[in-house]
Amino acid sequence: MPTLLLVDGSSYLYRAFHALPDLRNAAGEPTGALRGVLNMLRPLRETYKASHAACVFDAKGKTFRDDWYPQYKAHRPPMPEDLAAQIAPIHSCVKAMGWPLIMQEGVEADDVIGTLARIAAEQGYEVIISTGDKDMAQLVNDKVRLINTMSNEVLDEAGVLAKFGVPPNRIIDYLTLMGDTVDNVPGVEKCGPKTAVKWINEYGSLDAVVANAANVKGVVGENLRKALDFLPLGRRLVTIATDVALAEPLETLTWRETDREVLLEQFRRYEFRGWLRELEGGGDLTAARPAAASAAPAPQAALFDNDAQRKTYECLLDWPSFERWLAKITAAPLTAFDTETDSLDSMQAQLVGLSFSVQPGEAAYLPVAHRYAGAPDQLPLDEVLAKLKPWLESAQHAKVGQNLKYDMHVLANHGITLRGVQDDTLLESAAWESDKSHDLESLCNRHLGLKVLAYTELTGKGAKQIGFGEVEITRAAEYAAEDADVTLRVHNILNPQLQTEAGLQRVYRDIEMPVLEVLWRMERNGVLIDSFLLAQQSDELGRKMMDIERQAYEVAGQPFNMGSPKQIQELLFERDKLPVLKKTPTGAPSTDEEVLAQLALDYPLPKLILEHRSFAKLKNTYTDKLPRMVNPQTGRVHTSFSQTGAITGRLASTDPNLQNIPVRTEEGRRIRAAFIAPRGWHIVSADYSQIELRIMAHLSGDEGLLGAFARGEDVHRATAAEVFGVAVPEVTSDQRRYAKAINFGLIYGMSAFGLAKQIDVERSAAQLYIDRYFARYPGVARYMEETRALARHNGYVETVFGRRLHLPEIKSSNVGRRQGAERAAINAPMQGTAADIVKLAMRAAHDWLRDENLHSRLLLQVHDELVLEVPDEELERIKTELPLIMGGVAQLKVPLLVEAGSGANWDEAH
């Protein structure tokens, strides 16, 4: 049977570009995508022995889908310049390797592939499509199958059903319901894979789902009904065309001769030395590289990966193997370490197993609590931990891990304090490449070119997901040992890179790593809440919401669901004809908070809806939820702090988020009042005053700003005096308010339009104020212009301490994206420096409390504030000395001012 091999070249491009590190030749030209594409193409020709083949790429310009839907792919960022620079050499090398290359204007690569697949299947060919694009699953039939070179996955009809939950002939329905955020194709809001599969299996098809839309209950049913008008167009957009008029007929797609001269020229230029030696020695680049010989299996069943690189993974089920590995980690200069547990809640998770790696390719998994029918005997947990405890608690035995803060909690749950935490790949990645993803799977793709086992491949998903302790031990060992192994390998790549950049090394070594332990201790401490007070507040909020509902019904002249955007749209825009200020992606009038806030200035109903939403958010997010999050063992609420949640280095708080409690309203402030100190203690809040403005003065070196801070003046009043040309005592409250908006607005790159909107003046007046500001503070104007220029040149900006904040859109051809990046370039150094200072303050406060043997403890970090729990006998000392310690962590051109307050609860202290 003849075979047609089709490669989705556009999918290859992006996968290779994002999977590999920033590789370059001596001339500085990027080479990673080129190397990755050729590496993926190379084995295909020999592996599948196809008689016909093509590598298909997207052509430039619009396609027929853009005519159907102008917003199609509108949110996609432009191709990164480093990738664009590699397109021509990729095309050149692909053709030189003998691949027929197709780029057809007016259609997408998918449509060319779809048409070729249909024609070939009808003519009796076997069709193999190499892609990572899930949309291609709609093409699968008894003659067409998909292969994924990254995961070695093969999808035939049964494989599609097993992976997606629907057969190939229902993939279009499945994609239509979910939509495609990458291509900007809306689906049914909040309809994910599980819901789409459920509906299709229940009703049979998309058409049947639409016909039964009125019967679908709940919010998702309401969302389905809102989407009905768009679904037919959505289905057309996600359907791959199979009737394209082909510029390259099937019969012409036979293998070409290899052009060795072109390959030699390209490999020399891009410094692919291994391939160059192979070609010069007479080798054939169209053949797969011969597999390396595997070493003999180690005891307890060694495992090997698919790229022929030797991996020796052991599962430790007896004492001799355990003792052998204990000797290894005890002697090793550095050990990669990981835990497997029965829960994602770090405060309650219990050990299921531990894994170790001492050198790349060599790792072991130690199971201790796998419980399923037929599970082999495992070493007893208590005895294992007793033998491991000296090593785990030894500061002299260096350890590296991925997000070791979690593992520290897990071990603490078992009475062990992990010490010797030398490195963390999560934090190494965040310091080295702040704008990228830092999860282990992404790190492996990017730096090792490896596809690792995913957790859900072992445990499943959703309602049928099993705990890790129920995973078959051999499979669990492969996953857990691989985690330790690749963590060590990623560390061996990232750590030397960090050491080449003094600023990044300082951020990682002096700020992020020490703060890891501080955050662990803060999370462990938790915070005490008054559940009774929150219950009272919840009841009050509920009554206020009911009162607002009654008022809203009176204003509207009818009852309606205040949580339904569709009903609110109908009332405000269809019935009352209020002005449409913004539209949703489907073209419907938006009812988001920004729109309602603007309409509330002139109309009563939007104001009531907005108030109702704000109370509902407080009730659902805090007053109802916080009491349910009290840990039964500690009686406290334990948030989790992430060091990698923002490229600026600011911390993020989750489960629960205690950084976003609103404080501008009385109701929000009352929630803070429920965060209390135990009897005989106080809550202390230590807050940096105007830290970002002080950093602006330092970075810009502007004499006017520096002088105002040095003299201890009210900087907003001083700015108002400069801008409005009056003496400081004569500044009015409105003028000070305007000056405050200018001071903070310029930090965030606010335009004259934005300022005018904020302070409610004409745009020309706002522009005049900004012009006067820059005339009085020329150093600020100079700093902003120089920073924008530096960002355009380097692609990043830096904090005072050397944290690098990457701005991938700074050279974008899209004006809006480029201007957004320019605003970020001005703000990021200030936000990032503030984040660095706060982290330094946390470290200094933690060390001071420990060294002085004080009982006070850090609880929370919120924006520029530290919150502590302080025994009464230490209160005055903390309030006196802590501000001095925090103010002394950085030497700027202006003093850092810290104000400390105290009270029985957080609201009183703030």
Image (cartoon, grey):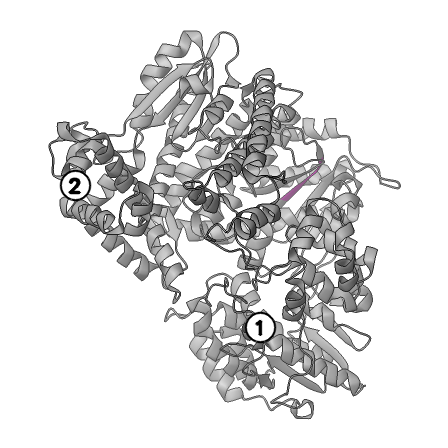
User: Does residue 353 show up magenta in the picture?
Assistant: yes
Label 1 packing within 10 angstroms: few (<14), some (14-19), many (20+):
few
Apparent side of residue 466 relative to residue 308 in the rendered image (left or right): right
Number of labelled discs?
2
Q: Which residues are magenta?
A: 352-356
Whether residue 191 appears in this view of the structure is no
Label 2 packing within 10 angstroms: few (<14), some (14-19), many (20+):
many
User: Does residue 94 show up magenta in the picture?
Assistant: no
- Work out which residue is located at the far front of the displayed protein and give it: 557
Q: Quadrant of residue 631?
A: top right
Residue 138 position (above or below residue 538): below
Whether residue 545 appears in this view of the structure is yes
Residue under pointer 2: 723
Residue 288 position (above or below residue 827): below
Secondary structure at badge 2 equals helix
Amino acid type, label 2: Val
Residue 68's disc number = 1
Decide which of tag 1 and tag 2 comes sooner along the chain: 1
Secondary structure at badge 1 equals helix
- Work out which residue is located at the far right of the displayed protein and give it: 374
Q: CA distance from mark 1 to mark 2?
A: 51 Å
Taking depth in this image into account, of 314 and 852 the one nearest to the observer is: 852
Apparent side of residue 181 relative to residue 53 in the rendered image (left or right): left
Taking depth in this image into account, of 262 and 910 the one nearest to the observer is: 910
Give the overall secondary structure of the magenta segment. Answer: strand
Apparent side of residue 33 relative to residue 239 in the rendered image (left or right): left
Residue 533 percent location from the top left of the image:
57, 17
Amino acid type, label 1: Trp
